[in-house]
Amino acid sequence: MKNAYILVGPPGAGKGTQAELLDEELDIKLIQPGVFLRKEAEKDTDVGVLIRKFLAHGLIVPNQIVDKKVFQVLKKVKKDVLFDGYPRTIPQAEKLYEFLTEKKVKINFVMISLQDSLIMERINGRRSCSCGETFHIKYNPPKKKGVCDKCDKKLFIRSDSKKNIVKKRIELYKKETAPVIKFFKKKKRVNFVKINGAKPIEKVHQDILVIFNDNGKD
Ligand code: ADP
Ligand code: ZN
């Protein structure tokens, strides 16, 4: 692993959408704790039930549960890594930063910004697949209504998409994740890039690709 790319942004900014596009195009390892957690939450195991409660209330799942899974993958990975929606808290950020700097991995912190007024529209129209694909009824509709283009499974509306829950997730983002942005911004050797998430999906994708291409030239 030479490079790590960290996608951070408010709910609905397009992290998942961009992560999937990059994953299709590049030879990278995608780490999406949110997708993993939503899968776990469907199971009736102790952890599954626990995770379900946190997600249903729009809360951040305890660090230990998320970190365990993330570092299991990280310790084995050889390719460059792309994080979608991780780290979300300062303890997660510190631990990840330490791991990556120790291994001399270049950290590329990609902040996708989106104003509050657009967040609701994005999330209201979002349709998700358990494979990780994300669609939007207006901005990125699936070819066949209600069905995933990639794997043909039925699309669903995420349980954390209700209006009051989204509000809570935006609040939590400002409280827990905004400090994470500050944390990485202050680090000298981190490549910190801000991307305007309000642009169309393909434009945002091109803006992010520039970061990958620049690293390829090193
Ligand atoms: P996040 O992972 O940051 O919560 P998603 O990738 O799930 O965000 O995107 C939220 C919703 O907005 C989805 O329905 C997605 O299809 C749509 N979307 C993502 N990026 C854009 C964009 N640039 N323009 C319009 N809609 C977008
Ligand atoms: Zn799918």
Image (tube, grey):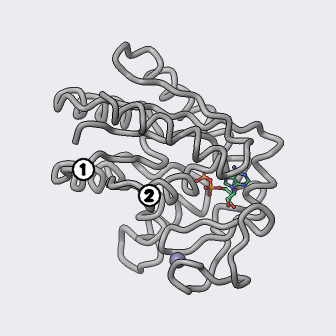
SS type, badge 1: loop
Q: Nearer the viewer, mark 2 or mark 1?
A: 2
> Which residue is tagged 1?
79
> Which residue is tagged 2?
25
Tell which of 200 and 165 is nearer to you. Answer: 200
| Structural crowding at the residue carrying mark 1, measured as other residues with C-alpha within 10 Å and reported as few (<14), some (14–19) or many (≥20) | some
In primary-sequence order, the first of circles 2 and 1 is 2
Identify which amino acid the numbered label 2 is placed on. Answer: Glu
Q: Residue furthest front?
A: 217
* Residue 142 coordinates in the image, percent (x, y): 68, 75
* Residue 64 coordinates in the image, percent (x, y): 32, 49
* 113 is higher (above) or lower (below) than 65: above
Residue at point 48%, 67% (across, down): 38
Pointer 1 residue Cβ closer than 8 Å to ligand 1: no
* 34 is higher (above) or lower (below) than 145: above
Q: Are marks 2 and 1 in contact (CB under 8 Å)?
A: no
Tell which of 155 and 199 is nearer to you. Answer: 199
Q: How many marks?
A: 2
Left or right of residue 173: residue 101: left
Residue at point 58%, 57% (across, down): 17
Identify which amino acid the numbered label 1 is placed on. Answer: Lys
| Structural crowding at the residue carrying mark 2, measured as other residues with C-alpha within 10 Å and reported as few (<14), some (14–19) or many (≥20) | few
Image quarter in which the C terminus is found: top left
Image quarter in which the N terminus is found: top left
Residue at point 23%, 27% (across, down): 101
* 155 is higher (above) or lower (below) than 170: below
* Residue 127 coordinates in the image, percent (x, y): 67, 70
* Residue 178 coordinates in the image, percent (x, y): 57, 29
